[in-house]
Image: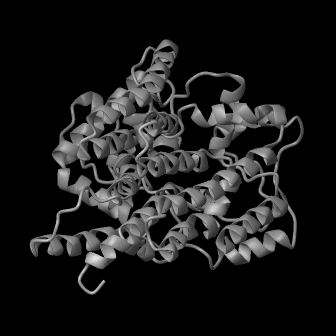
């Protein structure tokens, strides 16, 4: 309760110090979709639907307030799902999502990640129960998560596989059906809009950007239509991956039409596939390099100073982002608010939060240690089994641990590392660590 109250106080400080919200270039795309409902080529419309539900309030302050409540709810769910662990472990598992300053800042930022985290944590927490009625709810929560951020797609397979592993075949089928119905419906809407199959139309472009961190056209020997996407600079001299999607001088951006046309996206996907199949070890090394940024002790500026700055509580009132799509969506944001938009910084509350953010975060090596706790406990459990003791069922920590790993690896493999992509995985990793320390396991571990 003390941790929860402190977490609530931090969120009240954010509401008081930065009014009404913090902005990100993606924010404006989401707001445009509120007023012109249609699938976006880059981002699914789940977060826009969330904003649409809150539109009658005409207040971005209300949006951030709800997002802070979702963050608090995620912490509570982690604690409750870890109820089989020692109480101290369940409390520690909830600490990062409740008290990490960057988590509080992300909740105050008008982006989809807080909603995505809440939906995923809710689905995983329900999977730790034994109530058959929750299976369909898990599927619907996963579908909502995928329609909020497409990186959640592998989690449908992970959680369905969890039920199969526990020999609960029928619940696995119910989960898949509950998840697929909304996804297929959204896919039909997307097809009706763009005459393309999928949930978004930028998968090829993002994978191309990932491949440009290592692609060597001399080794690939691409056909003439793909050579236009080559970069003659050595990989060590190239910019971060995202620049190959958004920079005006990027080879893909220079092609006729918008970057994410069907033709351009398919061309980019072919280039990426050729690069990966020709240089599989370079691709693996690139993915590991991006993933390794998750576990550094410091917080170096990446991918650039502008993006990095959006994740810090600002000192001065930020101007409207100059990048697309902010230029297009600012007027729609004013329509949503029915007034002026911007961020007003109020002292001393903002200063207290900045001081807190300079010290209160989960360092990367600590997160790595949290991820290693369940496998270490599993090895100890394996030793117990070799001594002829009774065999236990599938470990309860397996599903949150697998989900956390997927959420960390998928962006590094398909796009690039970003600090805000890490945060939704943290509560799942902490939950897995707590569940691996439940009392019955500790009693079985030698010396436990």
Q: For residue 275, which quarter of the picture? A: top left
Q: Nearer the viewer, residue 314 or 142?
A: 142
Vertical order, 23 against 274 (above or below): below
Q: Is residue 77 left or right of residue 228?
A: right
Q: How far across and how far down the image is residue 220, in percent?
A: 19, 43
Total numbered labels: 0
Q: Nearer the viewer, residue 114 or 256?
A: 114
Q: Is residue 251 visible?
A: no
Vertical order, 55 against 109 (above or below): above
Q: How far across and how far down the image is residue 369, in percent?
A: 38, 75
* Residue, far front: 390
Which residue corresponds to the image point at 33% horizontal and 71% vertical from the top-left?
A: 440
Q: Is residue 286 left or right of residue 84?
A: left
Vertical order, 349 against 175 (above or below): below
Vertical order, 384 against 305 (above or below): below
Which residue corresponds to the image point at 61% horizontal and 37% vertical from the top-left?
A: 47
Which residue corresponds to the image point at 50% horizontal and 61% vertical from the top-left?
A: 427
Q: How far across and how far down the image is residue 332, in percent?
A: 77, 31
Q: How far across and how far down the image is residue 383, in percent?
A: 15, 75
Q: For residue 15, which quarter of the picture? A: bottom right
Q: Nearer the viewer, residue 43 or 135?
A: 135
Q: Is residue 410 visible?
A: yes
Which residue corresponds to the image point at 26% horizontal and 76% vertical from the top-left?
A: 444
Quarter of the image where the C terminus is located: bottom left
Q: For residue 368, which quarter of the picture? A: bottom left
């Amino acid at each position: 309760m003390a941790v929860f109250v402190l977490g609530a106080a931090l969120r009240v400080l954010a509401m008081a110090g930065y009014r009404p919200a913090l902005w990100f270039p993606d924010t404006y795309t989401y707001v445009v979709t509120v007023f012109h409902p249609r699938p976006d080529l880059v981002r699914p419309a789940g977060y826009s639907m969330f904003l649409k539900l809150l539109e009658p309030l005409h207040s971005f302050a209300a949006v951030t307030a709800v997002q802070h409540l979702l963050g608090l709810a995620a912490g509570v769910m982690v604690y409750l799902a870890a109820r089989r662990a020692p109480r101290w472990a369940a409390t520690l598992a909830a600490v990062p999502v409740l008290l990490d300053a960057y988590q509080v800042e992300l909740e105050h930022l008008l982006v989809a990640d807080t909603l995505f985290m809440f939906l995923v944590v809710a689905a995983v927490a329900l999977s730790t129960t034994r109530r058959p009625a929750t299976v369909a709810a898990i599927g619907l929560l996963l579908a909502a998560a995928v329609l909020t951020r497409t990186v959640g797609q592998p989690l449908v397979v992970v959680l369905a596989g969890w039920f199969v592993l526990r020999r609960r075949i029928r619940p696995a089928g119910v989960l898949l059906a509950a998840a697929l119905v909304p996804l297929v419906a959204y896919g039909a809407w997307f097809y009706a809009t763009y005459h393309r199959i999928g949930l978004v139309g930028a998968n090829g472009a993002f994978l191309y950007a990932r491949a440009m961190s290592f692609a060597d056209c001399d080794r690939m020997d691409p056909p003439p239509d793909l050579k236009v996407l080559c970069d003659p600079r050595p990989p060590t001299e190239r910019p971060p991956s995202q620049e190959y999607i958004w920079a005006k001088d990027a080879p893909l951006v220079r092609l006729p039409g918008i970057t994410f046309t069907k033709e351009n996206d398919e061309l980019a996907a072919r280039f990426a596939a050729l690069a990966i199949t020709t240089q599989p070890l370079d691709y693996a090394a690139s993915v590991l390099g991006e993933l390794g940024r998750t576990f550094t002790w410091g917080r170096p500026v990446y991918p650039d100073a502008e993006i990095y700055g959006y994740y810090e509580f600002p000192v001065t009132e930020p101007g409207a982002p100059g990048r697309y799509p902010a230029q297009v969506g600012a007027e729609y944001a004013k329509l949503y608010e029915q007034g002026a938009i911007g961020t007003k910084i109020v002292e001393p509350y903002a200063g207290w939060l900045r001081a807190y953010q300079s010290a209160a975060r989960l360092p990367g090596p600590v997160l790595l240690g949290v991820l290693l706790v369940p496998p270490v406990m599993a090895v100890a459990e394996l030793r117990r089994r070799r001594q002829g003791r009774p065999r236990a069922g599938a470990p309860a920590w397996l599903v949150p641990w697998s989900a956390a790993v997927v959420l960390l690896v998928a962006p590094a493999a398909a796009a690039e590392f970003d600090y805000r992509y890490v945060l939704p995985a943290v509560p799942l990793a902490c939950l897995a660590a707590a569940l691996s320390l439940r009392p019955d396991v500790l009693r079985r571990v030698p010396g436990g």
